[in-house]
Image (cartoon, rainbow, N blue to C red):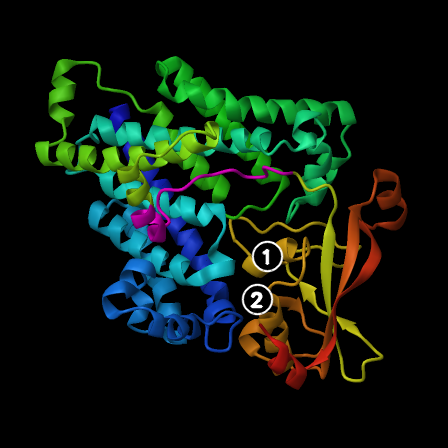
Amino acid sequence: MRKSTLVNKLFFAALGGIYVVAFRSLGKQVKGLYGKRGIRPIAGFLDAVRPSLRPSERLRYVPSLFWIDASDATLVRACRAGQIGGVMLALRIAPRTTAAALWALYLSFVSTGRDFLSFQWDVLLLENGLHAIVVAPSRRGKRPPTSAKALMRWLAFRLQFESGHAKLASRDKTWRNGEAMAYHFETQPLPTPPGWYSHQLPRRLQHLMTYATLGVELVVPWLAFAPRRLRRAAFALLSGLQVAIGVTGNYGFFNLLTVADNLWLLDERPRTRAARLATKPPWWHRVLSLGAAVPIVAVSGATLASRLFQRARTPEPIAKLQAAVAPLYSINPYGLFAVMTTERPEIVIEGSNDAVDWQEYGFRYKPGDLDRPPQWAQPHMPRVDWQMWFAALGPAPPWFFHFLLRVLEGSPDVLALFEHDPFGGKAPRYVRALLYDYHFTDLATRRKTGAWWRRELLGTYVIPIELDDLRRLRP
């Protein structure tokens, strides 16, 4: 099998599978997140922005199919349709049309999803979806145009290099002094059991891991444009980093998607003239590919230049193009963990019927019970659990009050997001939120007590509140 078409098949199989995972994961939570009685109803959001937008502006600024209907049933059906489409894409059934439909469907969620669909892997999936329309084979056995393959390598390069550059540009001292990985395993949003063990490694080894991460992200991506053997080495190193990240922490489908992008580093041009002629893409595909690649590279290149060189000035035509495509979330800057968190505040939600006896709600994946080990979630993306990590780093965001409101209303869809509901599906009279400082235990403590975590109360995050008061106060 020709490697130039094999990589294409592997990429579409991977991307289709990731779409299945993404829509299936979202489908498990969609009513609790975005339904009529969810935390952030999509229908309510669209009703709120509708008066401020002319009919001709709605799809431009909020590109979503849910302008037509955003009922709970439609949201559930959209997730199911996404899974079916993912299977079709993996099998390369009408790949360009299927890729376009999946991109539009996922964009419909991201453009209206706000807090819970704002992660870098969500926009990375959209960017891959857009690129897939360009790189999709015109006919079976035909290789993608050279410009399409270059576009995929450019994306793989940007994702890794921008993440490395962001770590240095932030001037975060832990990345500069080698301490970042001494904190990362413990303070990342949703660690895994291997993450707990990695935190116990010798400090010197953790320093080495910090500098190795920077080296892989800053140096290795340049090999994406090197000869074949160096690109193979780059694939191994970049994908190896993703395996390490995925083993020690839960990042949904991010690691799988990044490895799928890296596949394009393995692509080869057919070696014989006969093979090149047999797999040559038709002229219209070459024109389509080049026509898409030029503006995408212009926009993303200008964004990268502005990050590398603070005095760099974006030409006005490109700046206008950047503004025009921004609502599509499909040409993005990247920069995971630019600043390493050195502490782990955790929010604990409690309910009570008398404001004296308080019962704790348990999440499926975020830390809570001290004796429960870190959980495996991936490739599932538990969006409330993840956002709880961000919320704990500052004042309570608006969505958190909506969350508490639904708990006090006893919304079945929201309560289903918990693993443990101490009130058995009924609404408590009061809720409150406490803030704790969490730390991993050490090996000796875990052997002695069985505890994976230890915690110290920092204070009250949200004071005890009743339903009527919260309805008046909610942002």
The kind of residue on which mark 1 rests is Gln
Label 1 sits on residue: 387
Q: Are marks 2 and 1 in contact (CB under 8 Å)?
A: yes
Which residue is at the front of the view, 362 or 177?
177
Question: Which quadrant, please, contains the C terminus?
Answer: bottom right
Q: Specify start and end residues of the magenta stretch as a single range.
A: 323-339
Q: Regarding mark 1 in the picture, which secondary structure is present there?
A: helix
Which comes before the other along the chain, label 2 or label 1? 1
List x then y, in percent, for residue 7: 31, 30
Rendered location of residue 116, percent (x, y): 51, 59
State left or right for residue 3 relative to residue 281. Answer: right
Q: Is 77 one of the magenta-colored residues? A: no
Mark 2 element type: helix
Tell me if I can see residue 219 in this picture.
yes
State left or right for residue 375 relative to residue 457: left
Outermost right residue: 448
Q: Assess disc 2: are there few (<14), some (14-19) or many (≥20) residues with their C-alpha within 10 Å of its C-alpha.
A: some
Taking the magenta stretch, the answer to whether it contains residue 325 is yes
Q: Examine the rendered structure and indicate whether residue 38 appears above or below residue 367.
A: below
Q: Position of residue 359 (x, y in %)?
A: 77, 73
Amino acid under disc 2: Trp
